[in-house]
Image (tube, rainbow, N blue to C red):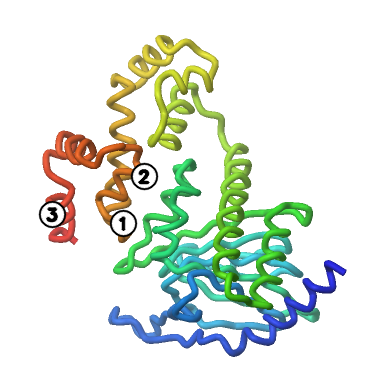
Amino acid sequence: MRNKYIDLAINKLGIAFDSLDLTFHQMDTGVPGDVTSYWPGNKDEDVLICVFKGKQIHEPFHRQDFFFINYAYKDSYQALSEKYNNLITINEDECYIGQPYSGYALRADSSEDVVIIGVLIRKDSFFQEYLPTVYTDSDLFRFFVEPQTNKFSDEYIHLPVTKEHAIRTLLEMMVVEYADKGEDTQRILKSMLQTLLLEIARRYRIEKSGSAPKTLAEQIIDYMGDHSDVVTLKDIAAHFSYHPNYISALLHKETGRKFTEILLEKRMERAVLLMKNTSLTIEEISVLLGYSNHSNFYKAFKEYYQMTPREYLKLSCNKS
């Protein structure tokens, strides 16, 4: 019965795919053929679920002004990426996650139906509601924050999953919910998206763990970056099973800096990323960074950069 509802929902959204307004508009870049698509959902939607179901698709290379998560639900397809100037094969049960204004094009040519589930997220909505979800992974946080409306981003995340993974189940639930929308569908989808992003972050960490091993000091600094909003020396000592004095001495030996200096650096790096690339207010950013009082954030920022946050932004805008 469950599979029947999923199949019906996939078929329904597959038919609706052709009616989505994915018109490509010429961009003011001076580059012929440089086109983008804008948010295709309704004005009151922050999350849109779409399904491509068919044997062939050949999109022109384009950009988009929203985040997206594409999942190869059935069979494989290819994605054209500008940075690597090649076709990336997305196999069944793999995700391709793209940034706003990243170059992208769907390509498929199969004898059987290819099914791709897409989760589209408004950029401003993502910054307002979902940043805390990815905050505890520095690489994932940077991926979602760095794209800007006046810059082209070329990065993507290619993430393998499995049929039994919660990511697939969550996407099926989102498809069923969106195919039979109710008044509370957006609220339900937003809750599901929170969980989906947590599962993606977990899977992303597992994939990264297979890379070259890091020294203890490097692991500690990474941990500080991932938890810079709440971390203390005592927390780190407990996490790595060392005495706080040893952690402090090790960091000073390896970096020449104190724990508090490294933590401040991590917080200020994130502050600048958030200030330059999101619509969050200074007060909202200070809370996200772990400051209970935004005046403390102003003070720390000015001591670190020798200027106020607004002066920093003004200077940054003048340079760009």
Within 10 Å of disc 1 (Cα), the crowding (few <14, some 14-19, many 20+) is some
User: In the image, what residue occupies the spot 70% across and 65% down?
Assistant: 173
Say above or below: 105 vs 32.
above
Q: Secondary structure at mark 3?
A: helix
User: In the image, what residue occupies the spot 77% across and 57% down?
Assistant: 163
Residue under label 1, please give it: 280
Tell me residue 278's x, y (percent).
33, 59
Residue 181's label in the rendered image is none
Q: In terms of image quadrants, where is residue 246?
A: top left
Quadrant into which the N terminus falls: bottom right
Q: Secondary structure at mark 2?
A: helix
Say above or below: 82 vs 250.
below
User: In the image, what residue occupies the spot 38% across and 81% down?
Assistant: 34
Quadrant into which the C terminus falls: bottom left
Separation of residues labelled 3 and 2 (CA atoms): 23 Å
Residue under label 3, please give it: 315
Q: In terms of image quadrants, where is residue 109?
A: bottom right
- Cβ atoms under marks 2 and 1 closer than 8 Å: yes
Residue under label 2, please give it: 288
First reached walking from the N terminus: tag 2 or tag 1: 1
Q: Nearer the viewer, residue 70 or 275?
A: 275
First reached walking from the N terminus: tag 1 or tag 3: 1
Separation of residues labelled 1 and 3 (CA atoms): 18 Å
Asked whether residue 85 is in view, the answer is: no
Asked whether residue 225 is in view, the answer is: yes
- Cβ atoms under marks 3 and 2 closer than 8 Å: no
Tell me residue 88's x, y (percent).
60, 65
Whether residue 162 sits left or right of residue 33 in the image: it is: right
Within 10 Å of disc 2 (Cα), the crowding (few <14, some 14-19, many 20+) is many
First reached walking from the N terminus: tag 3 or tag 2: 2
Amino acid type, label 2 = Leu
